[in-house]
Image: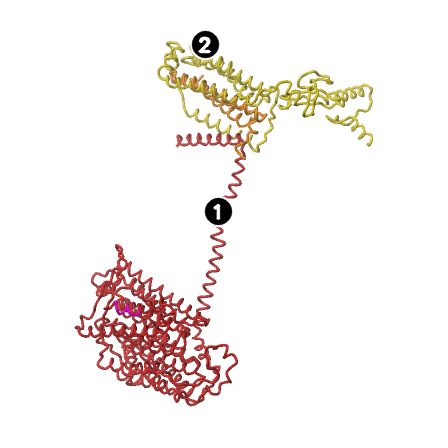
């Protein structure tokens, strides 16, 4: 089997995640979709690492995980405070971008 | 010295116009005295010029640098040569006499001081015009005389007709002034300077073929623009319409500005720029055509007018037509044109002063049909007017005879078909001149005394002229000495100037260094031409006598023939202007407004509406949903990826 | 897992890829399409575990373990906590509210996916280096050498980022109490002064057949009383209304008895929430 298949899988997961971000209204689910996209990226990075025969790809995937963790912490905090003020976790309810 | 010549009337204008009512009593004396000072200075300068050699008679006085800009040099410099001194003497001489005359004529006018201020202003501007050493300064004088003319035509501005006439004169002149300014600009772009000497010299160099710096097209354009300017100032077809109405001004003004001096500025301009016209034969042809048309045009108008001043105005137009025609003939005609200009200045000023004197004695009545048999009551006016009349019709021996005869000869000498046509036109013009002047003479001074049996002071008369003070049947009387003396002096001029200038071609030789001169060779002998002129003149006089001498003149003008009616309306010049220019202008404006509203505004508003509509569509995209924006971002990313792949593929 | 995977792909890996890959895609689709956030989170956790297996298969042993421990273990639990805070049972309506959003999203997704696949397909790969050499000194040792050598500054900055994120999360969620908490006495006095509802709030489930916190107690006329449910649940809209269930049950009983007694069944559908009196009155009119 050609390891390129991992890339195809990563692309598929990424696209599913992106579509989910666009389609879902629940902020938590949107967030989970973003995590899915990040994981898809990580998969491709690790596949690259294997193809090139060095560990730099894994290092970058590792950093991605750390950043994702930080992002999840802050993002979930935002969702919680949003829910507190608006009593809703729907991204459509936060329409402050348009008066 | 030359500057002082101008400074004197300028000082007069300043003092009189700024001096206020304190000068009301002495104002006219100051104005007249300064005019005489100017004349005296002119005479001294003339004597000085006479003392020099013929080729050494050009004096240039550089007063100060007017516009000292790099690449744009204009100086206030004056040029005194044979041509300008001739004008200076004419302007200051006739001007001084008319100042004297005005003292009497304007005696009862409250605003006499102001009138003299304007007259002095006119003298100064006219002197600047003829003495200027470059075209820019000439333009200053040109506008100055236009201003003075406007102020003086509208001097009695309480009369709506006068105010309208002043505006009309100003506006029509503006067209001509536009021509002059364009000509000056063209000169600057072509030659890089305004001064006469370099411009005319380089044109001369161009014609002689040595390293032609300018094409004939440019020269023709400049010449045509100069001609347009001359047409405006000198009331030539097609810008002639203002002169008749300009007679609304006081009669001395008509005499000085609209007969003797200002209206001849166009002729001066053409003669001064002779080198340019010589280099542009096409333009020269146009000049002669304009002159010929105006000559006949003015003469026909003069035949039909019952208003004595308007008849004389038509005559002025016609005589200037002669001059312009002569100036268009080139070196054959320049000096002759100036000579006719000077003699015309004398006799036409005399005629106008005579007309003013008649009006003065007839309660300011201008309708010749209400005159008649005045010779008994105004002997001096009759004699001086009569001498002027004989001069203008070219009675042998008087000044008009010499100058006009020379023009007719020069016209024939043009040669070929053109020569014959122009000669015939001038000859016919001479006949018509004799006809209408005889008509004026007969209606005014001969025949029955029609003013006695007027329909007893028409009811609207008091309303029309409440200030006349006399009312009822007029009591014709001779004018005071202060008015008759200038008339007598001018009559002397009209009688003897021609002979003085003409015999031995003295005048022509005097001007030759400036205007150059060559003898024409008419296809028939000069004597034949003279004989023909005299014959035609006699026929004109005879016809006029048949029409107006033998038969009584009706007080109310008969309906007349088609031509008469047309001529009474100035050959429909105003109607033509109205229909073609005013209506045309209105239509043009309206269509432009329409275009502006629909096209320009349409484009602007359409753009605005389009942007607005697009924006309100686009606004829907800005719905505030983060997910919508995310779609845009995602779509954009997809497009970017596609573009990258495409670039790689290509 | 298998050392062979480091330099070549075996049939075993292929089989594993196709099976687990399918599961991963299904999990991803479940994340997107599950109505409830909890189900989405569980699907995502499944996908992540599958990915962890793939990491291991690709020679990233350390990251595979980290993926399970940190991602699936910690981060997904964080998600579940938040889901609980927001409301576990709250089901999203999947009905789209923005016009055209779903189609646009689908179009963009398909287009983007096609482009990605096309892009990857362009990059041909015939042979590849395995990680055998790189992992020769041990995967963790290799990573550590890079992390504390080449990428040490990035690593330090990541630490700063994590601390900042932790502080940020605290700042965002922490609410400073600006006034003293009211005592029982003060609350009671306030309630008396307002005079709105003086006695203690009724307990949920009172007069109701079910006994649960999210089921409102029924008033004597059969309507649910919202006062019986906690304010938090009220705000979330998670009150379960059972007031119509009794009527529905009754109607079902009637129908069953009618079938058994071979009477003519009622042709009208039971109206949820509608009062029986009104229904009878309408029948009488007919």
Element carrying mark 2: loop
Q: Which chain is orange?
A: A
Name the side, left or right, on which C60 lies relative to B197: right
Whether B157 is among the magenta residues is: no
Of residues B48 and C222, which is closer to you in this image?
B48
Chain containing the residue with disc 2: C
Q: Residue furthest front?
A: B22
Q: Main secondary structure of the magenta part?
A: helix
Q: Residue furthest left?
A: B53
Q: Is residue C46 visible?
A: no
Give residue B254's quadrant in the image: bottom left
Whether B4 is among the magenta residues is: yes
* Chain B shade: red
Give residue C139's quadrant in the image: top left
Please say if C55 is above or below B264: above
- Tell me the residue at 61%/26% (across/down): C93
x then y, percent, for residue B232? 36, 69
* Chain C shade: yellow
x then y, percent, for residue B555? 47, 85
Magenta range is: B3-9
Give residue B519's quadrant in the image: bottom left
- Residue position marked by numbered label 2 in the rendering: C1
Chain containing the residue with disc 1: B
Of residues B453 and B219, which is closer to you in this image?
B453
């Amino acid at each position: 089997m050609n390891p390129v298949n991992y890339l195809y899988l990563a692309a598929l997961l990424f696209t599913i995640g992106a579509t989910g971000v666009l389609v879902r209204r629940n902020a938590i689910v949107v967030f989970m979709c973003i995590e899915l996209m990040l994981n898809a990226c990580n998969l491709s990075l690790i596949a690259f690492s294997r193809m090139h025969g060095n560990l730099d790809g894994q290092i970058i995937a590792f950093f991605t995980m750390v950043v994702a963790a930080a992002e999840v912490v802050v993002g979930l905090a935002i969702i919680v405070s949003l829910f507190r003020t608006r009593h809703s976790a729907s991204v459509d309810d936060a329409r402050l971008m348009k008066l | 010295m030359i500057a002082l010549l101008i400074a004197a009337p300028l000082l007069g204008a300043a003092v009189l116009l700024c001096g206020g009512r304190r000068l009301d009593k002495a104002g006219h004396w100051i104005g007249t005295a300064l005019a005489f000072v100017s004349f005296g200075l002119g005479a001294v300068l003339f004597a000085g010029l006479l003392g020099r050699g013929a080729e050494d008679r050009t004096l240039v006085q550089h007063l100060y640098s007017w516009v000292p800009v790099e690449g744009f040099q204009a100086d206030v410099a004056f040029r005194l040569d044979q041509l300008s001194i001739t004008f200076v003497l004419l302007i200051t001489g006739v001007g001084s006499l008319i100042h004297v005359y005005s003292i009497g004529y304007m005696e009862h006018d409250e605003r006499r001081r102001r009138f003299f201020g304007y007259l002095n202003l006119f003298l100064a501007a006219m002197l600047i015009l003829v003495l200027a050493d470059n075209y820019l300064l000439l333009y200053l004088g040109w506008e100055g005389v236009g201003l003075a003319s406007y102020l003086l035509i509208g001097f009695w501005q309480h009369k709506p007709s006068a105010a309208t006439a002043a505006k009309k004169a100003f506006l029509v002149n503006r067209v001509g002034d536009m021509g002059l300014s364009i000509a000056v600009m063209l000169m600057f772009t072509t030659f890089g300077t305004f001064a006469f000497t370099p411009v005319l010299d380089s044109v001369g160099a161009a014609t002689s073929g040595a390293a032609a710096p300018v094409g004939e097209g440019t020269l023709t354009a400049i010449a045509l623009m100069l001609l347009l300017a001359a047409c405006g100032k000198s009331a030539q077809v097609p810008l002639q319409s203002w002169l008749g109405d300009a007679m609304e001004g006081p009669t001395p003004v008509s005499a000085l500005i609209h007969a003797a001096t200002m209206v001849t500025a166009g002729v001066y301009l053409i003669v001064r720029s002779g080198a340019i016209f010589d280099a542009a034969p096409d333009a020269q042809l146009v000049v002669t055509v304009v002159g010929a048309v105006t000559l006949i045009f003015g003469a026909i108008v003069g035949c039909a007018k019952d208003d004595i001043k308007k008849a004389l105005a038509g005559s002025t137009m016609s005589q200037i037509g002669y001059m312009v025609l002569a100036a268009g003939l080139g070196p054959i005609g320049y000096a002759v044109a100036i000579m006719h200009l000077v003699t015309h200045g004398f006799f036409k000023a005399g005629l106008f002063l005579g007309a003013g004197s008649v009006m003065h004695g007839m309660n300011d009545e201008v309708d010749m049909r209400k005159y008649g048999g005045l010779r008994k009551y105004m002997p001096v006016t009759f004699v001086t007017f009569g001498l002027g009349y004989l001069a203008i019709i070219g009675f042998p021996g008087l000044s008009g005879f010499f100058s006009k005869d020379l023009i007719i000869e020069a016209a024939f000498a043009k040669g070929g078909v053109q020569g014959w046509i122009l000669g015939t036109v001038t000859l016919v013009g001479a006949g018509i001149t004799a006809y209408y002047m005889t008509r004026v003479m007969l209606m005014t001074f001969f025949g029955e005394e029609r003013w006695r049996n007027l329909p007893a002071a028409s009811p609207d008369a008091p309303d029309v002229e409440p200030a006349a003070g006399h009312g009822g049947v007029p009591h014709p009387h001779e004018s005071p000495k202060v008015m008759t003396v200038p008339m007598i002096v001018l009559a002397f001029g009209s009688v003897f100037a021609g002979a003085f200038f003409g015999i031995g071609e003295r005048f022509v030789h005097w001007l030759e260094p400036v205007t150059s001169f060559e003898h024409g060779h008419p296809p028939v002998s000069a004597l034949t031409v003279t004989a023909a002129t005299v014959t035609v003149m006699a026929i004109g006089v005879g016809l006029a006598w048949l029409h107006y001498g033998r038969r009584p003149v009706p007080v109310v003008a008969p309906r007349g023939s088609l031509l008469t009616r047309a001529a009474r309306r100035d050959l429909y010049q105003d109607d033509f202007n109205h229909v073609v220019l005013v209506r045309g202008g209105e239509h043009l404006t309206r269509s432009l407004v329409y275009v502006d509203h629909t096209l320009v505004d349409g484009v602007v508003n359409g753009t605005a509406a389009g942007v607005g509509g697009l924006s309100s569509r686009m606004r829907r995209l800005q719905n505030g949903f983060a997910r919508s924006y995310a779609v845009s971002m995602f779509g954009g990313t997809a497009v970017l990826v596609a573009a990258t792949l495409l670039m790689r593929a290509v | 897992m298998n050392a062979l995977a480091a330099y070549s792909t075996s049939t075993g890996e292929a089989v594993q890829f196709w099976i687990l890959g399918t599961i991963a895609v299904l999990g991803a689709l479940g994340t997107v399409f599950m109505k409830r956030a909890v189900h989405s989170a569980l699907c995502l956790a499944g996908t992540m575990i599958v990915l962890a297996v793939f990491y291991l298969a690709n020679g990233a042993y350390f990251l595979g373990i980290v993926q399970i421990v940190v991602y699936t273990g910690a981060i997904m639990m964080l998600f579940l906590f938040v889901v609980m805070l927001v409301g576990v049972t709250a089901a999203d309506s999947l009905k789209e509210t923005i016009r055209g959003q779903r189609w646009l999203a689908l179009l963009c997704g398909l287009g983007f996916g096609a482009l990605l696949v096309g892009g990857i397909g362009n990059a041909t790969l015939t042979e590849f280096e395995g990680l055998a050499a790189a992992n020769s000194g041990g995967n963790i040792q290799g990573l550590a050498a890079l992390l504390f050598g080449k990428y040490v500054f990035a690593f330090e900055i990541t630490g700063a980022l994590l601390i900042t994120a932790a502080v940020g999360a605290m700042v965002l969620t922490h609410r400073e109490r600006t006034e003293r908490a009211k005592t029982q006495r003060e609350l009671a006095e306030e309630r008396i002064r307002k005079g709105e509802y003086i006695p203690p709030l009724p307990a949920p489930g009172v007069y109701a057949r079910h006994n649960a916190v999210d089921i409102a107690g029924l008033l004597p006329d059969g309507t649910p009383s919202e006062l019986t449910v906690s304010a938090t649940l009220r705000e979330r809209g998670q009150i379960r209304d059972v007031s119509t269930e009794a009527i529905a049950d009754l109607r079902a009983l009637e129908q069953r008895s009618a079938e058994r007694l071979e009477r003519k069944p009622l042709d009208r559908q039971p109206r949820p929430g509608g009062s029986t009196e009104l229904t009878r009155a309408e029948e009488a009119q007919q």
